[in-house]
Amino acid sequence: MLAYDFPILGLFWTMLIFFIWVAWIVLVIRVFVDIFRSDIGGLSKALWSLFVIFLPFLGVLIYLIAHGDSMVQRNIDDAQRSDAAFQAYVRDAAGAGGVASELSKLSELRSNGTLTDAEFEAQKAKLLAG
């Protein structure tokens, strides 16, 4: 008799059940986050929460059927906002060309007559100082 009491198929099923359980927990958390992130009223949020808590399988399934499209749209909107904020941060961190770019803009303003020579020199000294 072999010392193995746990056959490979039993290990496979245990791992499968474990991963399905983790996926279920992630799905329930995402549904709760979406319930409280959505623009439905407070009473609706409370009822959906109670429905998901007391009848979890049915509550999550019905919520996904009823609000799945808006849930996806909110996720897309959040991702786009995060991406826009990241892009703005990168542009700010990279700078807009530095002192040379600012000096060329000042020179252009002086040649257009918007700035006088004295104003140009004052702004140029301010840029070069710091």
Image (tube, helix red, strand yellow):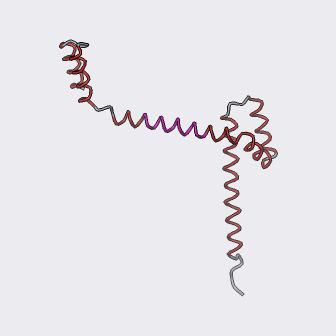
Residue 42, image x, y percentages: 74, 29
Image-based side of 33 in relation to 80, left or right: right
Q: Is residue 86 magenta?
A: yes
- Residue 2 in the image: above or below residue 54: below
Image-based side of 126 in relation to 20, left or right: left
Which of the pair 37/2 is nearer the observer?
37
- Residue 22 in the image: above or below residue 31: below
Residue 61, image x, y percentages: 76, 47
Our reading of the magenta stretch's main secondary structure is helix
Q: Quadrant of residue 7?
A: bottom right
Q: Residue at x 79, y 39 (%)?
A: 50
Where the N terminus falls, by quadrant?
Answer: bottom right
Which of the pair 16/78 is nearer the observer?
78
- Residue 41 in the image: above or below residue 27: above
Q: Residue furthest bottom?
A: 1
Where the C terminus falls, by quadrant?
Answer: top left
Q: Quadrant of residue 43?
A: top right
Q: Residue furthest front?
A: 112
- Residue 56 in the image: above or below residue 92: below
Residue 37, image x, y percentages: 65, 35
Which of the pair 87/55 is nearer the observer?
87
Magenta region: 75-88
